[in-house]
Image (cartoon, helix red, strand yellow):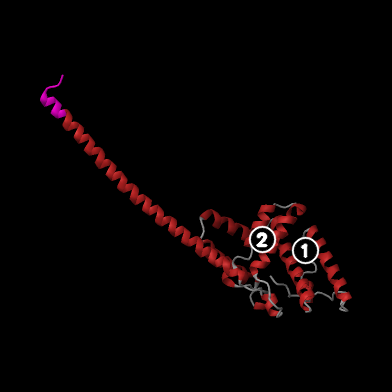
């Protein structure tokens, strides 16, 4: 059907086509390799940032809460320990308080996250409330720079919501913060024989949610009963201003 010349042309065309395909494949393969390398480097950078974030968070496991250090209690709790029990409290009490459980747990987990960099600032540190908020906000912005944008935005939003008492969840978590503090104070008193009355004075009328008011009242009743049995004072003196731990 084809002459010798025609068959040569067809063969030449086939070889050229194969060669072009080989060149295109080699080019696309090289591009893919460069893309894969870039993605691997990006992934490695993101992993490094996440590990940096986790190392910052890990500092809270060793940061002792200022109020207990100031009162020289033995083995004072850490900020991480405080936030852990708060988070469990949110998990089990949110339903009764009719607040969003997941949001409350998340808020409890991040509300003191900035302390990993600025420390546990209390009124006894000589720092105003406005200065404390500014320091913590700046620290938190630096901390969340190590995570992806979605996580960073969520953490910042939760912190600001908590600081502003902007929602029922925020008020609920503030109550958890105070309840955990007085519960811890009661535990120290019972175990170490110390008097931490100032922590009970500063939180006498701060609870906003019914459930936390009830728990606070029951805790104080048990404390008075224990103190009476130990030969201590059965009642609580008038509140002393400016002794809160926030």
Query: Judging from the image, what secondary structure is the residue with disc 1 in?
Result: loop
Q: Earlier in the sequence, mark 1 or mark 2?
A: 2
Label of residue 183 in the image:
none
Q: Position of residue 110 (x, y in %)?
A: 62, 61
Identify whether 208 is placed above or below 126: above
Query: Judging from the image, what secondary structure is the residue with disc 2 in?
Result: helix
Q: Position of residue 194 (x, y in %)?
A: 78, 79
The residue under the point 72% across, 60% down is 89
Q: Are marks 1 and 2 in contact (CB under 8 Å)?
A: no
Identify whether 116 is placed above or below 6: below
Q: State the residue position of label 1.
A: 207
The residue under the point 66% across, 75% down is 66
Label 1 Cα neighbours within 10 Å, binned few <14 / some 14-19 / many ≥20? many
Q: State the residue position of label 2.
A: 108
Residue 177: quadrant of the picture: bottom right
| Numbered range of the magenta stretch | 1-9
Horizontal side of residue 241 vs 14, given as left or right? right
Marks 1 and 2, how far apart at CA: 16 Å
Horizontal side of residue 194 vs 149, given as left or right? right
Can residue 240 be seen here? The reply is no
What secondary structure do most residues of the magenta stretch adopt?
Answer: helix
* Residue 19 is inside the magenta segment: no
Q: Position of residue 4 (x, y in %)?
A: 11, 25
């Amino acid at each position: 059907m084809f002459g010798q010349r025609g068959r040569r042309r067809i063969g030449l065309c086939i070889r050229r086509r194969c060669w072009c395909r080989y060149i295109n494949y080699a080019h696309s393969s090289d591009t893919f390799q460069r893309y894969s390398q870039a993605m691997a480097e990006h992934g490695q950078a993101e992993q490094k940032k996440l590990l940096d974030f986790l190392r910052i968070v890990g500092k809270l496991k060793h940061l002792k809460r200022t109020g207990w250090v100031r009162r020289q209690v033995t083995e004072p709790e850490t900020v991480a320990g405080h936030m852990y029990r708060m988070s469990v409290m949110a998990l089990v009490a949110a339903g009764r308080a009719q607040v969003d459980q997941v949001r409350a747990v998340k808020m409890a987990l991040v509300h003191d996250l900035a302390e990993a960099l600025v420390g546990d600032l209390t009124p006894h540190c000589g720092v105003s409330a406005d200065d404390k908020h500014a320091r913590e906000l700046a620290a938190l912005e630096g901390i969340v720079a190590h995570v992806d944008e979605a996580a960073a935005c969520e953490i910042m939003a939760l912190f600001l919501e908590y600081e502003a008492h902007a929602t029922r969840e925020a008020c609920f978590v503030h109550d958890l913060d105070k309840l955990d503090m007085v519960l811890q104070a009661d535990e120290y008193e019972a175990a170490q024989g110390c008097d931490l009355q100032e922590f009970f004075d500063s939180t006498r009328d701060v609870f906003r949610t019914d459930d936390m008011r009830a728990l606070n009242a029951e805790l104080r009743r048990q404390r008075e009963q224990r103190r009476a049995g130990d030969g201590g004072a059965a009642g609580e003196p008038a509140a002393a201003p400016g002794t809160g731990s926030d």
